[in-house]
Image (spheres, grey):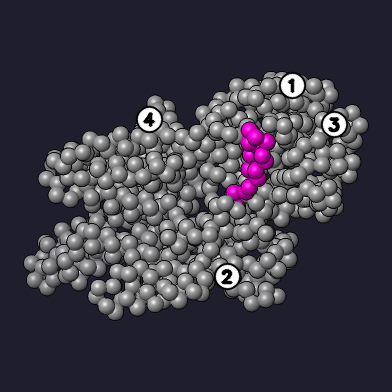
Amino acid sequence: MLQQGSALPELPWLLALALGALGLVRPGTRLIGAFCLGLLWASWQAGLALERRLPPALEGRDLTIEAQVVSLEVRAPDYTRLLVRPRRLEAAEGWQPRLIRLGWYGGLPAMAAGEHWRFTVRLKQPNGLMNPGGFDYERWLFAQGIDATGYVRAPETAQRLADGWHLNRWRDAVAGAIAEQLDGRPAQGVIVALAVGERRWISDSQWDTLRATGTAHLVAISGLHIGLVGLLAGMLAGRLWRLSAAACRLWPARLPAVATGMLAGIAYALLAGFTLPTQRALVMLLVPALALLARRRIRPWHGFGVALAAVLLWDPFAPLSAGFWLSFGAVAVLLAAGTDRAPAGWLRTALWTQLVVSVGLLPVSVPWLQTVPWTSPLANLIAIPVVGLVVVPLTLLGTAVLLLAPNVTLPLELAAELMAWVLAVLDWLTALLPAAGAAAAPVWALVLAVLGTLLLVLPRGLPGRWLALPLLLPLLLASPALDRPGEALRLTLLDVGQGSAAVLEAGGEALVYDTGPVSGSFDAGALALVPYLQSQGYRQVRWLIVSHGDTDHSGGTETLLRHFGVLDARVGEPVAALGKRAACVRGERIDWQGVQLEFLWPPIAGLGGNDGSCVLRATAAGISILLTGDIGARIERRLVSEQAEALSAEVLLVPHHGSRHSSSADFVQAVAPRYALVSAGYRNRYGFPRPEVVARYREVGAQLLETAAEGAIRVRIMQDGELLVDSYRRQKARYYHRRPEL
């Protein structure tokens, strides 16, 4: 409940919760007291976490920090991403962060986890893109305890202060040794991930396959893996213990078996880096194990509840991750499905279990992951037993052997060969039936899906179980209404950082104007544009207009084309991914779903560059939107002199992100927008929008809205001529999100 709030409880609410927590002392009100105490605990922890965020006054300043390197998250020849734990900060005004994420540009000197370094850094508050359907990076940073992000200034001045030991240093060495032994094998990356949780050797195509088949959880060291390791180690210890009568007289075999399983689980969690997901999984394992060691009878649902409470006490922010809901959801579904069930054959039990988990988790997985992996039940039925019972034990055995005898690699090679076969099967399943992107599920479909799940897990013989599938179908098939009554045109300017991507929607069709930037591993097409279109229920794009070829406007085109068909396109200059497409030329008019589209620039095809940007005017219900690409002041003067009347618009996408070389005074006065929208990155290095540009728009009475502050900006033109404007941050921000100024 707390994580859904737009703000933390204020003092009156906290006092009320404190009074409610006193209910713990009376048997009849203990449940209410525990509930209030839980909210108080989570609120306190959240308040402490927010206090550790980078103060705004320190943003953009050069700071000198002394920090321990926790891990090297991304490693490339010209870029490295570091996670560091600060030990000392100079001139930081008492700020004490938990973790900082830093970029290191250029070649990295010899560096290892555990070492202490002095850096000069420039930081900013945790910030991420905010778009409907997109990944919430700010939520992830908050849940991971990362209080600032930034980059190392003048890397050549960084100094190593001292050596030091860190668990990740040992993990890096183990991961490197395994990767070296399996170099060139298709499953190299997956085996390293299963051994130590290091995923950088897994290729993008393999990730796509794992996600499409719903088996990505297999390479995340989670409750499944830790539980299997604990179970196998415990079974082996129990079997060996029973070989000695004297040992059994001393302790029942169950006790050393449970203790060994616990130790094995702890060791595996440490090997995986003891990350928050592994900590959560370990707590889930330790709760029933400790009950067994204490010789306490623990009913399944009681153990589930205790484990859930323990995880939330350990990490109150666990509900911010999909893994929390998937882990506990899977256990809950299995417990419910197993209640009062008669034993069956192992094959029937395996099939039923996989079906129940795959179908029963749809109400969780579809909203969180926004994809429907149709082959998931079959893929997991094949992959889970093979990976869990054979590949993981072989991997761990091979890792132990590798540490003791580096030349003995047979177990790792066997694991790699078997995993390669699993990946080949998953590739075949993906080609047979690709996963589908899921639209944002309506609330009514989620409610019906939960009811369907409850019916699915009811004991056999109870009436109405056949309704489970019909009740689940709306979650998979329902989409938001694409043809919105009363709405003539909708513009969504997506938050894509330093670039531009906009979607116009009318009559159940979508027009995309620019596709956002691509830089290194950052792809606005994958992070913002495609998720948005999928969340709205689109299956194809009617029009694609790429204003010009700069990568901050055209970079996401290839990704868009991989996921959506494009019926027609116009380009300001050729884009390789689109092949040969018609150029936008002044004077072309298109009547699209009652919206009048008109190109105002360029006058001839092939002009190219910023000056050749497609300038598009869209008019509906007497209200116009002007999209301008990266035109500069010279082109603006020509537009004003040649087409001044056509420039008037209520909504303007500010040219060239608000640079000083655009938005000239005459142009701003000719357009005279009510709303001027700026697509630019948070604290971008260019300083866009420039102060003098902001001043010009304010002089004509325009309200300036920036994606960096607002997230995705939505403009709706109603059939009656009403103009409505809002932003995703203002609508959906939680207490842990950066807030736009009022």
Element carrying mark 3: helix
Q: Is residue 536 above or below residue 173?
A: above
Q: Is residue 190 visible?
A: no
Q: With 322 as the anchor, is 659 left or right in this view?
A: right
Element carrying mark 1: strand
Q: How far apart are labels 2 and 1 at the CA level?
A: 54 Å
The residue at the point 70 percent across, 49 percent down is: 706
Residue for badge 1 = 589
The residue at the point 28 percent across, 65 percent down is: 306
What amino acid does circle 2 point to? Answer: Arg
Give the x, y percent position of residue 578.
65, 25
Q: With 403 as the anchor, is 5 left or right in this view?
A: right
Q: What's the magenta bit mostly, secondary-structure-wise?
A: strand
Q: Looking at the image, is mark 3 or mark 1 nearer the viewer?
A: 3
Residue for badge 3 = 645
Q: Tell me whether circle 4 and circle 1 mark residues in contact (CB < 8 Å).
A: no
Q: Is residue 329 above or below residue 434?
A: below
Q: Callout 2 environment at 10 Å: few (<14), some (14 to 19), or many (20+)?
A: some
Residue for badge 4 = 429
What amino acid does circle 1 point to? Answer: Arg
The residue at the point 70 percent across, 68 percent down is: 58
Q: Looking at the image, is mark 2 or mark 3 nearer the viewer?
A: 3
State the extent of the magenta-drawn residues as a range. Answer: 714-729
